Amino acid sequence: MIGLGASGEAAARLALSQGGSTYVSDLRSDASTSTRAERLRALGAVVELGSHDLARITAAGTVVVSPGVPPDAPVLRELREARVSWISEPEFAVRFYEGPLIAVTGTNGKTTTAALAAHLLERSGVDAALGGNVGSGLAPAASELALRPRPPKWYVLELSSFQLAGVERLQPDIGVVTNLSPDHLDRYASVEAYFSDKARLFQNATPRSRWVLNGDSPDVLSLAGNAAGERFLFSRMSRPKRGAFLRGSRLVLTDVAAEGSGEEELLDAEDLSLLGDHNVANALAAALTARLAGADVEGIRAGLRAFPPLPHRLEPVIERDGVLWVNDSKATNVEAARSAVESLGRPLVVLLGGKDKGEDFTSLAETLKGRVRYAVLYGEARRRLAEALGAQVPHLKIEGSFEDAVSEADRVAKAGDAILLAPACSSFDMFRDYEERGERFASLARGSE
Protein backbone atom coordinates (compact mmCIF):
# COMPACT_ATOMS: atom_id res chain seq x y z
CA MET A 1 0.00 0.00 0.00
CA ILE A 2 1.42 3.38 -1.03
CA GLY A 3 0.05 6.15 1.15
CA LEU A 4 -1.09 5.90 4.75
CA GLY A 5 -4.13 8.09 5.07
CA ALA A 6 -7.49 6.75 6.24
CA SER A 7 -8.02 4.75 3.03
CA GLY A 8 -4.47 3.37 3.13
CA GLU A 9 -4.92 2.12 6.68
CA ALA A 10 -8.30 0.59 5.78
CA ALA A 11 -6.87 -1.21 2.75
CA ALA A 12 -3.96 -2.55 4.81
CA ARG A 13 -6.33 -3.83 7.51
CA LEU A 14 -8.42 -5.53 4.84
CA ALA A 15 -5.33 -7.18 3.34
CA LEU A 16 -4.24 -8.38 6.77
CA SER A 17 -7.71 -9.77 7.46
CA GLN A 18 -7.35 -11.90 4.34
CA GLY A 19 -4.05 -13.34 5.58
CA GLY A 20 -1.83 -11.40 3.19
CA SER A 21 1.62 -10.11 4.02
CA THR A 22 1.33 -6.34 3.89
CA TYR A 23 3.88 -3.59 3.27
CA VAL A 24 2.78 0.04 3.65
CA SER A 25 4.86 3.12 2.92
CA ASP A 26 4.35 6.87 3.09
CA LEU A 27 6.75 9.79 2.73
CA ARG A 28 5.04 11.53 5.64
CA SER A 29 5.96 10.89 9.25
CA ASP A 30 3.70 13.34 11.07
CA ALA A 31 1.85 12.42 14.26
CA SER A 32 -1.35 11.09 12.65
CA THR A 33 0.57 9.02 10.07
CA SER A 34 2.84 7.64 12.78
CA THR A 35 -0.19 6.65 14.87
CA ARG A 36 -1.68 4.77 11.92
CA ALA A 37 1.67 3.10 11.34
CA GLU A 38 1.82 1.85 14.92
CA ARG A 39 -1.70 0.44 14.70
CA LEU A 40 -0.83 -1.49 11.55
CA ARG A 41 2.49 -2.75 12.93
CA ALA A 42 0.59 -4.13 15.92
CA LEU A 43 -1.55 -6.12 13.45
CA GLY A 44 1.49 -7.53 11.65
CA ALA A 45 2.08 -5.13 8.77
CA VAL A 46 5.49 -3.85 7.73
CA VAL A 47 5.27 -0.05 7.66
CA GLU A 48 7.90 2.37 6.39
CA LEU A 49 7.64 6.13 6.85
CA GLY A 50 9.83 8.69 5.12
CA SER A 51 10.60 6.60 2.02
CA HIS A 52 9.33 3.87 -0.31
CA ASP A 53 11.11 0.54 -0.76
CA LEU A 54 10.76 0.07 -4.51
CA ALA A 55 12.04 -3.51 -4.42
CA ARG A 56 9.34 -4.52 -1.94
CA ILE A 57 6.64 -2.73 -3.91
CA THR A 58 7.58 -4.20 -7.29
CA ALA A 59 7.66 -7.69 -5.76
CA ALA A 60 4.12 -7.38 -4.40
CA GLY A 61 1.27 -9.32 -5.96
CA THR A 62 -1.06 -6.31 -5.65
CA VAL A 63 -0.05 -2.66 -5.38
CA VAL A 64 -2.68 -0.30 -3.97
CA VAL A 65 -2.19 3.46 -4.23
CA SER A 66 -3.93 6.10 -2.12
CA PRO A 67 -5.84 8.76 -4.12
CA GLY A 68 -3.80 11.39 -2.29
CA VAL A 69 -0.63 10.30 -4.11
CA PRO A 70 -0.35 12.47 -7.27
CA PRO A 71 0.20 10.67 -10.58
CA ASP A 72 3.55 12.42 -11.09
CA ALA A 73 4.93 11.29 -7.72
CA PRO A 74 8.44 9.86 -8.13
CA VAL A 75 7.45 6.44 -6.76
CA LEU A 76 4.71 6.11 -9.40
CA ARG A 77 7.07 7.23 -12.15
CA GLU A 78 9.49 4.52 -11.05
CA LEU A 79 6.72 1.92 -11.05
CA ARG A 80 5.70 2.93 -14.57
CA GLU A 81 9.30 2.59 -15.70
CA ALA A 82 9.39 -0.87 -14.09
CA ARG A 83 6.07 -1.70 -15.85
CA VAL A 84 4.36 -2.36 -12.54
CA SER A 85 0.64 -1.53 -12.44
CA TRP A 86 -1.40 -0.52 -9.43
CA ILE A 87 -5.02 -0.16 -8.36
CA SER A 88 -6.97 2.27 -6.20
CA GLU A 89 -8.22 1.51 -2.71
CA PRO A 90 -11.92 1.17 -3.75
CA GLU A 91 -10.93 -1.22 -6.53
CA PHE A 92 -9.15 -3.35 -3.93
CA ALA A 93 -12.11 -3.13 -1.54
CA VAL A 94 -14.86 -4.18 -3.96
CA ARG A 95 -13.04 -7.43 -4.68
CA PHE A 96 -14.17 -8.52 -1.19
CA TYR A 97 -17.75 -7.19 -1.29
CA GLU A 98 -20.57 -9.70 -0.92
CA GLY A 99 -23.48 -7.84 -2.41
CA PRO A 100 -24.54 -5.35 -5.09
CA LEU A 101 -22.85 -1.98 -5.50
CA ILE A 102 -24.10 1.55 -6.11
CA ALA A 103 -21.23 3.77 -7.31
CA VAL A 104 -21.70 7.55 -7.44
CA THR A 105 -19.39 9.97 -9.21
CA GLY A 106 -19.54 13.42 -10.79
CA THR A 107 -17.90 16.78 -10.29
CA ASN A 108 -20.31 18.18 -7.72
CA GLY A 109 -23.06 16.72 -5.56
CA LYS A 110 -21.70 13.20 -5.40
CA THR A 111 -21.34 13.12 -1.60
CA THR A 112 -24.86 14.44 -1.04
CA THR A 113 -26.30 12.06 -3.64
CA ALA A 114 -24.48 8.99 -2.28
CA ALA A 115 -25.32 9.79 1.35
CA LEU A 116 -28.93 10.60 0.49
CA ALA A 117 -29.39 7.41 -1.55
CA ALA A 118 -28.10 5.33 1.38
CA HIS A 119 -30.36 7.28 3.75
CA LEU A 120 -33.45 6.66 1.57
CA LEU A 121 -32.70 2.94 1.43
CA GLU A 122 -32.31 2.81 5.20
CA ARG A 123 -35.61 4.67 5.70
CA SER A 124 -37.20 1.97 3.53
CA GLY A 125 -35.76 -0.81 5.70
CA VAL A 126 -33.00 -1.73 3.25
CA ASP A 127 -29.56 -2.15 4.86
CA ALA A 128 -27.16 0.13 2.97
CA ALA A 129 -23.49 0.70 3.82
CA LEU A 130 -22.09 4.09 2.73
CA GLY A 131 -18.37 4.64 2.14
CA GLY A 132 -15.66 5.80 -0.23
CA ASN A 133 -14.70 9.40 -0.91
CA VAL A 134 -17.36 10.82 1.42
CA GLY A 135 -15.09 12.66 3.87
CA SER A 136 -16.03 14.87 6.84
CA GLY A 137 -16.12 11.76 9.03
CA LEU A 138 -19.51 10.92 7.53
CA ALA A 139 -18.55 7.47 6.27
CA PRO A 140 -15.51 5.19 6.19
CA ALA A 141 -13.16 4.25 3.38
CA ALA A 142 -14.40 1.61 0.94
CA SER A 143 -12.21 -1.08 2.52
CA GLU A 144 -13.87 -0.59 5.91
CA LEU A 145 -17.15 -1.80 4.42
CA ALA A 146 -15.52 -5.08 3.39
CA LEU A 147 -14.58 -5.66 7.05
CA ARG A 148 -18.18 -5.61 8.26
CA PRO A 149 -19.10 -8.90 9.99
CA ARG A 150 -22.32 -9.11 7.97
CA PRO A 151 -22.56 -7.76 4.43
CA PRO A 152 -25.23 -5.13 3.76
CA LYS A 153 -28.00 -5.46 1.21
CA TRP A 154 -26.34 -2.65 -0.81
CA TYR A 155 -22.89 -1.07 -0.80
CA VAL A 156 -22.97 2.65 -1.70
CA LEU A 157 -19.65 4.25 -2.69
CA GLU A 158 -18.80 7.78 -3.65
CA LEU A 159 -15.89 7.65 -6.10
CA SER A 160 -13.60 10.50 -7.11
CA SER A 161 -11.81 10.72 -10.44
CA PHE A 162 -8.55 9.93 -8.60
CA GLN A 163 -10.06 6.69 -7.30
CA LEU A 164 -11.61 5.77 -10.65
CA ALA A 165 -8.22 6.24 -12.32
CA GLY A 166 -7.08 3.05 -10.59
CA VAL A 167 -9.99 0.68 -11.24
CA GLU A 168 -9.80 -2.56 -13.21
CA ARG A 169 -12.72 -4.83 -12.30
CA LEU A 170 -15.06 -2.45 -10.48
CA GLN A 171 -18.54 -3.09 -11.86
CA PRO A 172 -21.40 -1.16 -10.26
CA ASP A 173 -24.86 -2.67 -10.38
CA ILE A 174 -26.14 0.90 -10.36
CA GLY A 175 -23.77 3.66 -11.52
CA VAL A 176 -24.63 7.33 -10.97
CA VAL A 177 -23.12 10.44 -12.57
CA THR A 178 -24.38 13.65 -10.97
CA ASN A 179 -22.86 16.23 -13.34
CA LEU A 180 -19.60 17.20 -15.04
CA SER A 181 -17.63 20.43 -15.20
CA PRO A 182 -13.92 21.32 -15.26
CA ASP A 183 -12.09 20.52 -12.03
CA HIS A 184 -8.70 19.44 -10.68
CA LEU A 185 -6.85 21.12 -13.53
CA ASP A 186 -3.90 21.46 -11.17
CA ARG A 187 -3.62 17.65 -11.35
CA TYR A 188 -4.92 16.90 -14.86
CA ALA A 189 -3.34 18.13 -18.08
CA SER A 190 -6.79 18.85 -19.59
CA VAL A 191 -10.53 18.66 -18.94
CA GLU A 192 -10.60 15.69 -21.32
CA ALA A 193 -8.13 13.79 -19.14
CA TYR A 194 -10.27 14.48 -16.08
CA PHE A 195 -13.43 13.29 -17.87
CA SER A 196 -11.55 10.22 -19.10
CA ASP A 197 -10.96 9.05 -15.53
CA LYS A 198 -14.64 9.61 -14.73
CA ALA A 199 -15.58 7.48 -17.74
CA ARG A 200 -13.82 4.47 -16.21
CA LEU A 201 -17.02 3.98 -14.21
CA PHE A 202 -18.48 2.44 -17.40
CA GLN A 203 -15.57 0.27 -18.50
CA ASN A 204 -17.04 -3.02 -17.17
CA ALA A 205 -20.64 -2.36 -18.17
CA THR A 206 -22.90 -5.31 -18.98
CA PRO A 207 -26.51 -5.55 -20.19
CA ARG A 208 -27.49 -5.92 -16.51
CA SER A 209 -25.91 -2.60 -15.54
CA ARG A 210 -28.20 0.28 -14.65
CA TRP A 211 -27.08 3.88 -15.07
CA VAL A 212 -28.56 6.95 -13.38
CA LEU A 213 -27.50 9.93 -15.48
CA ASN A 214 -28.04 13.68 -15.46
CA GLY A 215 -30.37 14.25 -18.40
CA ASP A 216 -29.66 17.99 -18.29
CA SER A 217 -25.93 17.48 -18.93
CA PRO A 218 -24.80 16.63 -22.49
CA ASP A 219 -21.33 15.92 -21.08
CA VAL A 220 -22.71 13.25 -18.74
CA LEU A 221 -24.68 11.59 -21.54
CA SER A 222 -21.60 11.69 -23.76
CA LEU A 223 -19.47 10.22 -20.96
CA ALA A 224 -21.71 7.14 -20.85
CA GLY A 225 -21.26 6.69 -24.59
CA ASN A 226 -22.43 3.31 -25.83
CA ALA A 227 -21.92 1.51 -22.52
CA ALA A 228 -24.15 -1.52 -22.13
CA GLY A 229 -27.05 -1.46 -19.68
CA GLU A 230 -30.27 0.41 -18.95
CA ARG A 231 -30.30 4.20 -18.70
CA PHE A 232 -32.46 6.17 -16.29
CA LEU A 233 -32.30 9.96 -16.45
CA PHE A 234 -32.99 12.62 -13.83
CA SER A 235 -33.83 16.12 -14.98
CA ARG A 236 -35.04 19.46 -13.68
CA MET A 237 -35.64 20.70 -17.22
CA SER A 238 -37.53 17.93 -19.04
CA ARG A 239 -39.48 14.69 -18.55
CA PRO A 240 -37.42 11.58 -19.33
CA LYS A 241 -39.07 8.39 -20.55
CA ARG A 242 -37.73 6.51 -17.50
CA GLY A 243 -36.30 8.30 -14.50
CA ALA A 244 -37.03 11.29 -12.27
CA PHE A 245 -38.17 14.81 -13.07
CA LEU A 246 -39.97 17.92 -11.82
CA ARG A 247 -43.60 18.58 -12.62
CA GLY A 248 -43.87 22.18 -11.58
CA SER A 249 -42.21 21.96 -8.17
CA ARG A 250 -43.13 18.30 -7.52
CA LEU A 251 -40.53 15.52 -7.65
CA VAL A 252 -41.83 12.60 -9.72
CA LEU A 253 -40.50 9.15 -10.66
CA THR A 254 -41.67 7.60 -13.90
CA ASP A 255 -41.49 3.94 -15.02
CA VAL A 256 -38.74 3.14 -12.52
CA ALA A 257 -39.98 0.32 -10.30
CA ALA A 258 -40.84 -1.89 -13.28
CA GLU A 259 -41.52 -1.50 -16.97
CA GLY A 260 -44.83 0.30 -17.36
CA SER A 261 -45.13 1.08 -13.63
CA GLY A 262 -46.23 4.65 -14.36
CA GLU A 263 -45.62 7.78 -12.34
CA GLU A 264 -44.92 7.96 -8.61
CA GLU A 265 -45.17 11.43 -7.11
CA LEU A 266 -42.85 12.08 -4.18
CA LEU A 267 -43.12 15.56 -2.65
CA ASP A 268 -42.78 19.28 -3.33
CA ALA A 269 -39.26 20.66 -3.69
CA GLU A 270 -40.02 23.11 -0.87
CA ASP A 271 -40.42 20.12 1.48
CA LEU A 272 -36.82 19.02 0.93
CA SER A 273 -34.51 19.51 3.88
CA LEU A 274 -31.71 20.80 1.59
CA LEU A 275 -31.14 24.28 0.17
CA GLY A 276 -30.68 25.05 -3.50
CA ASP A 277 -31.72 24.02 -7.00
CA HIS A 278 -28.63 21.83 -7.33
CA ASN A 279 -29.85 19.86 -4.32
CA VAL A 280 -33.18 19.32 -6.08
CA ALA A 281 -31.15 17.59 -8.81
CA ASN A 282 -29.26 15.60 -6.17
CA ALA A 283 -32.58 14.59 -4.56
CA LEU A 284 -33.94 13.43 -7.92
CA ALA A 285 -30.80 11.38 -8.55
CA ALA A 286 -30.82 9.84 -5.06
CA ALA A 287 -34.54 9.05 -5.10
CA LEU A 288 -34.23 7.42 -8.50
CA THR A 289 -31.21 5.39 -7.39
CA ALA A 290 -32.86 4.27 -4.16
CA ARG A 291 -36.06 3.25 -5.97
CA LEU A 292 -34.05 1.15 -8.43
CA ALA A 293 -32.36 -0.52 -5.45
CA GLY A 294 -35.66 -1.44 -3.82
CA ALA A 295 -36.61 1.52 -1.63
CA ASP A 296 -40.36 2.13 -1.33
CA VAL A 297 -42.05 5.43 -2.13
CA GLU A 298 -43.08 6.15 1.46
CA GLY A 299 -39.53 5.60 2.70
CA ILE A 300 -38.20 7.90 -0.01
CA ARG A 301 -40.69 10.64 0.87
CA ALA A 302 -39.88 10.43 4.58
CA GLY A 303 -36.15 10.35 3.92
CA LEU A 304 -36.20 13.37 1.62
CA ARG A 305 -37.96 15.40 4.30
CA ALA A 306 -35.64 14.31 7.11
CA PHE A 307 -32.16 14.26 5.54
CA PRO A 308 -30.03 16.95 7.22
CA PRO A 309 -27.64 19.29 5.35
CA LEU A 310 -24.17 17.78 5.19
CA PRO A 311 -21.25 19.67 6.74
CA HIS A 312 -19.53 22.19 4.45
CA ARG A 313 -22.16 21.79 1.70
CA LEU A 314 -24.45 24.86 1.65
CA GLU A 315 -24.71 24.40 5.41
CA PRO A 316 -26.50 27.16 7.35
CA VAL A 317 -24.24 27.94 10.32
CA ILE A 318 -25.94 30.75 12.24
CA GLU A 319 -28.04 33.86 11.76
CA ARG A 320 -26.93 36.79 13.88
CA ASP A 321 -27.67 40.50 13.59
CA GLY A 322 -29.94 39.65 10.67
CA VAL A 323 -27.09 38.07 8.62
CA LEU A 324 -27.21 34.39 7.64
CA TRP A 325 -23.80 32.67 7.54
CA VAL A 326 -23.62 29.76 5.07
CA ASN A 327 -20.69 27.32 4.84
CA ASP A 328 -20.14 25.83 1.38
CA SER A 329 -16.42 25.17 1.80
CA LYS A 330 -16.83 22.06 -0.40
CA ALA A 331 -17.51 24.40 -3.34
CA THR A 332 -13.93 23.93 -4.54
CA ASN A 333 -14.59 24.62 -8.23
CA VAL A 334 -16.32 27.29 -10.29
CA GLU A 335 -19.47 25.32 -11.05
CA ALA A 336 -20.06 24.49 -7.38
CA ALA A 337 -19.59 28.13 -6.40
CA ARG A 338 -22.00 29.26 -9.11
CA SER A 339 -24.63 26.78 -7.89
CA ALA A 340 -24.25 28.03 -4.32
CA VAL A 341 -24.66 31.67 -5.34
CA GLU A 342 -27.71 30.86 -7.45
CA SER A 343 -29.29 28.91 -4.57
CA LEU A 344 -29.60 31.77 -2.08
CA GLY A 345 -32.27 34.43 -2.49
CA ARG A 346 -30.70 37.03 -0.19
CA PRO A 347 -28.22 39.73 -1.12
CA LEU A 348 -24.82 38.10 -0.81
CA VAL A 349 -21.36 38.81 0.47
CA VAL A 350 -19.39 35.90 -0.93
CA LEU A 351 -15.94 34.72 0.11
CA LEU A 352 -13.88 33.51 -2.87
CA GLY A 353 -10.31 32.27 -2.98
CA GLY A 354 -7.78 29.70 -1.94
CA LYS A 355 -5.39 27.64 -4.02
CA ASP A 356 -5.78 28.32 -7.73
CA LYS A 357 -6.60 25.13 -9.67
CA GLY A 358 -6.36 26.81 -13.07
CA GLU A 359 -10.05 27.11 -13.88
CA ASP A 360 -11.57 29.87 -16.01
CA PHE A 361 -13.35 32.29 -13.64
CA THR A 362 -15.26 34.09 -16.41
CA SER A 363 -18.55 32.24 -15.90
CA LEU A 364 -18.31 32.89 -12.16
CA ALA A 365 -18.20 36.63 -12.83
CA GLU A 366 -21.37 36.36 -14.93
CA THR A 367 -23.19 34.55 -12.13
CA LEU A 368 -22.08 36.98 -9.43
CA LYS A 369 -23.11 40.06 -11.39
CA GLY A 370 -26.34 41.45 -9.97
CA ARG A 371 -26.53 38.82 -7.22
CA VAL A 372 -23.59 39.79 -5.02
CA ARG A 373 -23.09 43.08 -3.21
CA TYR A 374 -19.45 42.27 -2.50
CA ALA A 375 -17.04 39.48 -3.32
CA VAL A 376 -14.27 39.22 -0.73
CA LEU A 377 -11.21 37.71 -2.42
CA TYR A 378 -8.42 36.05 -0.47
CA GLY A 379 -5.60 33.54 -0.74
CA GLU A 380 -3.43 32.49 -3.65
CA ALA A 381 -6.17 32.94 -6.27
CA ARG A 382 -7.23 36.45 -5.19
CA ARG A 383 -5.44 38.37 -7.94
CA ARG A 384 -6.69 36.23 -10.82
CA LEU A 385 -10.19 36.32 -9.34
CA ALA A 386 -9.99 40.12 -9.18
CA GLU A 387 -8.97 40.25 -12.85
CA ALA A 388 -11.91 38.03 -13.83
CA LEU A 389 -14.46 40.02 -11.83
CA GLY A 390 -13.13 43.38 -13.03
CA ALA A 391 -15.71 46.15 -12.91
CA GLN A 392 -18.64 43.71 -13.23
CA VAL A 393 -18.72 42.73 -9.56
CA PRO A 394 -17.85 44.92 -6.55
CA HIS A 395 -14.98 43.18 -4.80
CA LEU A 396 -12.50 43.58 -2.00
CA LYS A 397 -9.07 41.97 -2.31
CA ILE A 398 -7.61 40.85 1.01
CA GLU A 399 -3.85 40.53 1.20
CA GLY A 400 -3.90 39.06 4.70
CA SER A 401 -5.28 35.93 6.32
CA PHE A 402 -8.51 33.99 5.97
CA GLU A 403 -9.58 35.52 9.27
CA ASP A 404 -9.02 38.98 7.78
CA ALA A 405 -11.26 38.03 4.84
CA VAL A 406 -14.05 36.79 7.08
CA SER A 407 -13.78 39.91 9.24
CA GLU A 408 -14.10 42.09 6.15
CA ALA A 409 -17.16 40.14 4.98
CA ASP A 410 -18.72 40.64 8.40
CA ARG A 411 -17.96 44.37 8.25
CA VAL A 412 -19.67 44.99 4.90
CA ALA A 413 -22.66 42.67 5.40
CA LYS A 414 -26.00 44.25 6.29
CA ALA A 415 -29.12 42.88 7.97
CA GLY A 416 -30.94 40.70 5.45
CA ASP A 417 -27.71 39.60 3.73
CA ALA A 418 -26.07 36.19 3.66
CA ILE A 419 -22.32 35.72 4.05
CA LEU A 420 -21.50 32.76 1.84
CA LEU A 421 -18.25 30.82 1.86
CA ALA A 422 -18.17 29.31 -1.65
CA PRO A 423 -14.47 29.61 -2.52
CA ALA A 424 -14.36 28.14 -6.09
CA CYS A 425 -10.83 27.01 -5.19
CA SER A 426 -9.16 24.34 -3.11
CA SER A 427 -8.04 25.08 0.43
CA PHE A 428 -4.44 23.93 0.34
CA ASP A 429 -2.79 27.36 0.39
CA MET A 430 -4.02 28.00 3.95
CA PHE A 431 -5.64 24.82 5.28
CA ARG A 432 -5.19 21.07 5.48
CA ASP A 433 -8.42 20.52 3.51
CA TYR A 434 -11.84 22.02 2.78
CA GLU A 435 -13.14 20.60 6.08
CA GLU A 436 -10.65 22.56 8.17
CA ARG A 437 -11.49 25.69 6.16
CA GLY A 438 -15.23 25.19 6.71
CA GLU A 439 -14.78 24.53 10.41
CA ARG A 440 -12.73 27.71 10.75
CA PHE A 441 -15.40 29.72 8.94
CA ALA A 442 -18.16 28.26 11.12
CA SER A 443 -16.20 29.03 14.27
CA LEU A 444 -15.67 32.64 13.17
CA ALA A 445 -19.35 32.91 12.21
CA ARG A 446 -20.41 31.86 15.68
CA GLY A 447 -18.00 34.34 17.24
CA SER A 448 -16.21 31.57 19.09
CA GLU A 449 -12.77 32.64 17.88
Image (cartoon, rainbow, N blue to C red):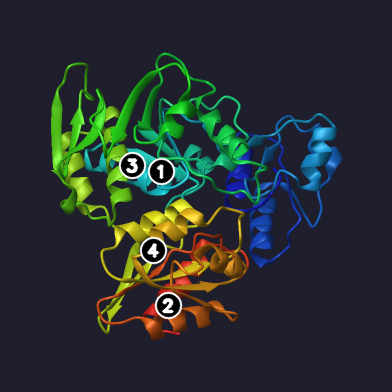
Between discs 1 and 2, the one toward the N terminus = 1
Residue indicated by mark 4: 369
In this picture, residue 99 sits left or right of residue 259? right
Kind of residue at disc 2: Ser
Residue 250: give its label.
Answer: none
In the rendered image, the residue lying farthest to the top is 207
Q: What amino acid is at disc 3? A: Ala
Instruction: Give the distance between the C-alpha atoms of the residues marked 3 and 2, in whole angstroms.
Output: 29 Å
Question: Type of residue at label 1?
Answer: Leu
Of marks 3 and 2, which one's residue comes earlier in the chain?
3
**Disc number at residue 443?**
2
Callout 4 crowding tier (Cα within 10 Å): few <14, some 14–19, many ≥20 = some
Element marked by disc 4:
loop
Q: Is residue 1 left or right of residue 141?
A: right
| Location of mark 1 (residue) | 130
**Residue 90 horizontal/vertical position (percent):** 55, 37
Task: Relative to 364, say whether 236 is above or below.
Answer: above
Residue 313 in view here: no
